[in-house]
Amino acid sequence: MTIIDGKKIKDKILGEVKDKIEKKNLELKLAIILVGDNDASKIYVSNKEKACEYVGIKCDKYLLDSSTSQEDVINLIDKLNNDDEVTGIILQSPVPSHIDFDKCAGTIKYYKDVDGFTRDNIYNLYMNKEGLVPCTVKGIIRLLDEYKIEIEGKHVVIIGRGNIVGKPLIHAMMNRNATVTVCHSKTKNLEELCRTADILVSAVGRPNLITKEMIKEGAVVIDVGISRVDNKVVGDTSFDEIKDKCTFITPVPGGVGPMTVAMIMENLLTAEDLKNNG
Ligand code: NAD
């Protein structure tokens, strides 16, 4: 059994991005919009800032008061869309309830949408013309690639059909010729379906959802879930219970989590390419 080291791969990727930026003398800029005062969001934004600083990408933060109107958020995105110095734009989720996140994020120009959430980018993923792919999904694929875990022809069972992970992952896996099964809160025979997975990806956010009985001997398990239990961050799997049945498994924390930021940095390179050639 191999524990997939997301932190190590993240560091490697950040090093590669830094090298590319230095060699090509690129001047890239990420604009992050944060509306309101969410503590978790502040941590995520700070991680993105740190990664930008490390690889040599400028990072402008727009900290907007929680009472900011949706119109003002859209106006700011419009301004950033039209600013040639801005390579990528992130609207940090969640936003206050009077703001429609999808509507606002949907106004980001597709080639600046480094989170990969706009219609054009989702359509490209759907059409197997991947451009800016949602970062967690890109991170999962990259972890499998880095550990030379074959996807083609494998039965991939995805638990969770959320818009950020589960749904885009269905397409990313199909684009790589996997046979894909999707499970969710209304799935009747979750245990049985999971046992047929060569690669099991859980993106739910429910501690101990995945137990030993649900794992096929030799399976690869990718745990995307994040929950807090007794002030500790845990995933969806009963890690200690299942690890010996797996060939590869991601820990939480330290598996998929670190990859998301690394993939934003890679998406900024892709965004620059799309701007010039797309
Ligand atoms: P979501 O709420 O959009 O989706 C959760 C999904 O889980 C739903 O499709 C629901 O049907 C399914 N579900 C709920 N209970 C279930 C059950 N008992 N059995 C089977 N399926 C069940 O959430 P999301 O945004 O897709 O995020 C999912 C998890 O991944 C969360 O814990 C989130 O924190 C985590 N996450 C991690 C990263 C990372 O970088 N590691 C990034 C994004 C999300």
Image (cartoon, rainbow, N blue to C red):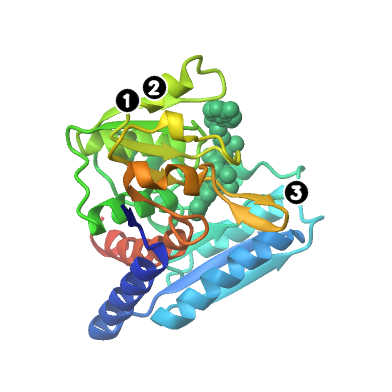
Residue at position x 38%, y 33% from top?
215
Q: Mark 3 points at which residue?
A: 96
Instruction: Please state if 179 lies on the left or on the right of 54 as rendered.
Output: left
Quick check: is the Cβ at mark 2 less than 8 Å away from ligand 1? Answer: no
Residue situated in front as seen by the camera: 159 or 269: 159
Q: Which amino acid does label 2 sit on?
A: Leu
Q: Is residue 180 above or below residue 255?
A: above
Residue 225 at x, y percent in the picture: 53, 45
Residue 201 visible in the shown view: yes
Quadrant holding the C terminus:
bottom left
Residue at position x 28%, y 34% from top?
198
How many other residues sit within 10 Å of disc 2, few (<14), some (14-19) or many (≥20)? some
Observer-side mark, 3 or 1, equals: 1
Using the image, tell me which numbered label, if any, was put on residue 95.
Answer: none
Of callouts 3 and 2, which one flags the residue occurring earlier in the amino acid sequence?
A: 3
Q: Name the residue under label 2.
A: 193
Q: Name the residue under label 1.
A: 196
Observer-side mark, 3 or 2, equals: 2
Residue 107 visible in the shown view: no
Instruction: Please state if 181 lies on the left or on the right of 101 as rendered.
Output: left
Q: Which amino acid does label 3 sit on?
A: Pro
Ligand 1 found in image quarter: top right
